[in-house]
């Protein structure tokens, strides 16, 4: 019985990572975008575009690598569109981001339904995609009792997401280019005055961040075995990622922790009943919680995070001072 309990806990930990690693991609990508001073509310749509193109092209090429690259490029092109409208044409960033979400979801359903009407690629038919998305146990770490299989036996995109998050933290805090990017987000006029090409930095990093979001969308497509139906694969994860940026204090490394916290509550929807059966004395009450509440929990927590962040103004916060403000070089 004890081994069964350990198995339930291990499965719960495993599911936290499996179902919520897309949040890490979305959050990390949005942090990079916002560090340039741009507020992009189009994460949901960008992830959807990356998902549909990455999945279809990856399957037809029968290559996980091609799928990852395609999803990145698709997301980056959405970022290029956002940058053209907000950086070059000085469009309102909030409205542009919301429009990009609507546009991205429209593209998702238009392309998906079009391909489905002809011949939808089933993930099971593409052995390189299926095998490439299989779990890879990390030697040594995966053998740790209770935690090993839950945290250190996952597919390659899980490890890639963690590497990208840590790499972006190092980039922002330990490289000259990253520090210049932060200067652009804090005070673009001051950065411009010392010779930093503000527009170039904004364009490059908006595209980079949106490309990372696109990979997160591709992960969700694969995690759902490419089953295309009337609901979008992204399913609100893009909006949660926007809130997670605040939760992580604009720190890609802390985004890993934030993903795990949000993932814990989201995974209760899937594993809550199993935990209640395994631990009836302490967690038996989980079985009486309505399923609808589990489904709403991630979004309720998102709202709480936003409320708390608006009340508590941290002086040492990571939010760029010029976030959401268009830079007019003529007014410098």
Image: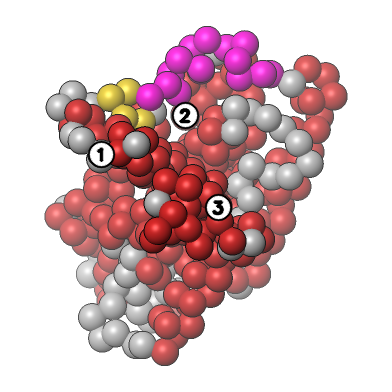
68 relative to 320, above or below? above
Distance from the alpha carbon under mark 2 to that under mark 3: 32 Å
Between discs 1 and 3, the one toward the N terminus: 1
Q: Would residue 133 be counted in the magenta stretch?
A: yes
Can residue 137 be seen in the rendering of this structure?
A: yes
Task: Answer whether labels 2 and 1 touch (C-beta < 8 Å).
Answer: no
Q: Tell me residue 16's x, y (percent).
A: 42, 46
**Residue hosting label 3:** 269
**Residue hosting label 2:** 69
Q: Relative to residue 207, is residue 171 drawn left or right?
A: left
Between discs 2 and 3, the one toward the N terminus: 2
Q: Which mark is residue 146?
A: 1
Front in this rendered view, residue 224 or 286: 286
Between discs 2 and 1, the one toward the N terminus: 2
Q: Would residue 321 be counted in the magenta stretch?
A: no
Q: Tell me residue 315's x, y (percent).
A: 26, 86
Distance from the alpha carbon under mark 2 to that under mark 1: 35 Å
Can residue 22 be seen in the rendering of this structure?
A: no
Q: Tell me residue 34's x, y (percent).
A: 41, 64
Q: Main secondary structure of the magenta part?
A: helix
Q: Secondary structure at mark 1?
A: loop
Quadrant the C terminus occupies:
bottom left
First to last magenta residue range: 121-135
């Amino acid at each position: 019985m004890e081994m069964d309990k350990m198995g339930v806990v291990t499965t719960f930990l495993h599911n936290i990572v499996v179902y919520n690693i897309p949040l890490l991609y979305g959050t990390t990508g949005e942090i990079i975008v916002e560090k340039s001073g741009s507020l992009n509310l189009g994460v949901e749509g960008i992830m959807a575009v990356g998902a549909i193109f990455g999945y279809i092209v990856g399957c037809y090429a029968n290559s996980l690598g091609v799928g990852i690259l395609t999803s990145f490029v698709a997301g980056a092109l959405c970022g290029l569109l956002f940058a053209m409208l907000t950086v070059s044409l000085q469009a309102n960033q909030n409205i542009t981001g919301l429009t990009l979400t609507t546009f991205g979801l429209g593209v998702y359903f238009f392309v998906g339904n079009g391909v489905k009407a002809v011949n939808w690629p089933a993930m099971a038919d593409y052995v390189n995609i299926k095998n490439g998305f299989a779990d890879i146990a990390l030697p040594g770490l995966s053998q740790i009792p209770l935690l090993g299989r839950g945290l250190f036996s996952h597919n390659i995109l899980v490890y890639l997401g963690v590497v990208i998050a840590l790499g972006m933290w190092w980039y922002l805090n330990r490289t000259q280019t990253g520090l210049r990017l932060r200067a652009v987000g804090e005070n673009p006029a001051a950065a411009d005055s010392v010779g930093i090409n503000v527009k170039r930095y904004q364009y490059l990093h908006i595209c980079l961040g949106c490309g990372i979001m696109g990979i997160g969308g591709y992960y969700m497509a694969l995690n759902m075995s490419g089953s295309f139906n009337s609901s979008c694969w992204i399913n609100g994860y893009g909006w949660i990622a926007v809130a997670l940026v605040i939760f992580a204090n604009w720190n890609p490394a802390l985004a890993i922790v934030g993903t795990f916290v949000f993932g814990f509550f989201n995974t209760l929807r899937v594993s809550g009943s199993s935990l209640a059966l395994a631990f009836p004395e302490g967690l038996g009450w989980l079985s009486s919680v309505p399923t609808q509440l589990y489904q709403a929990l991630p979004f309720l927590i998102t709202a709480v995070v936003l409320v708390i962040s608006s009340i508590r103004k941290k002086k040492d916060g990571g939010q760029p001072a010029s976030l959401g403000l268009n830079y007019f070089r003529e007014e410098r």
